[in-house]
Amino acid sequence: MKTVGQLLKETRIAKKLDRAEAASLLNVSESLIDALERDDYQALPAEVYIRGLIGKYVQILGIDEKRALALFRRGYESHQQKATPPQPLRQTFFSLTPNFVFGTIVSLVIIGFLVFLYWQYRSYVDKPLLVIVAPADNSLVYQDYVEVSGQTDPGT
């Protein structure tokens, strides 16, 4: 399929115009004509400027402007798609956002509350620590009344 650059170059050569003459008729540099005929859109200025240049160039060469602009549009759009591929969204492993911070704080408060409830439950249900000092282990007592002394955790 023909490009606008090929069409312009073939028509210019058929009309026996060299690049320098075409550049002087269009009041542009020869390198701009060369880039346009090579379809090198990277070396050309903005799209609007290129459209205007093609419009003037086809008038000088006697080509149908609509056809030339349609060829340019097709080639330029495919160039744009090649030149700027879509950038993938940057995936970060960890992102510190306000929602994340809020969720973390709420989770820590809930976990802390559950640990506190478990600790309170265990202290209520567990037997208190009791160390008996007197009478000694495995001692026989022949009295009706026995005095027992020992230690325990205060407050239990």
Image (cartoon, rainbow, N blue to C red):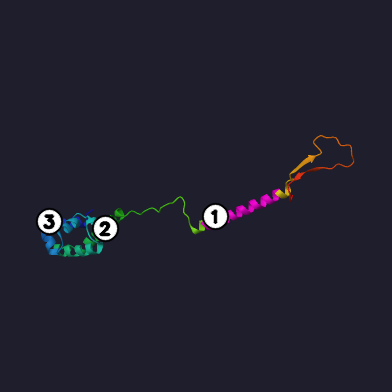
Quarter of the figure with residue 5: bottom left
Which of pointers 1 and 3 lies earlier in the amino acid sequence? 3
Which of pointers 2 and 1 lies earlier in the amino acid sequence? 2
Identify the residue under disc 1: 104
Distance, label 2 to label 1, CA atoms, is 50 Å
Q: Main secondary structure of the magenta part?
A: helix
Residue drawn 12% across the image and 64% down it: 25
Q: Which mark is residue 13?
A: 3
Could you tell me which secondary element the residue under label 1 belongs to?
A: helix
Give the image location of residue 139, x and y in percent. Answer: 83, 35
- Can the viewer see residue 66 in this picture? no
**What residue range appears in magenta?**
101-122
Residue drawn 61% across the image and 55% down it: 110
Looking at the rendered structure, the kind of residue marked 3 is Ile
Q: Residues within 10 Å of mark 2 (few under 14, many from 20)?
A: some
Distance, label 2 to label 3, CA atoms, is 23 Å
Instruction: Please tell me whether residue 14 is drawn above or below residue 136 in the rendered image.
Output: below
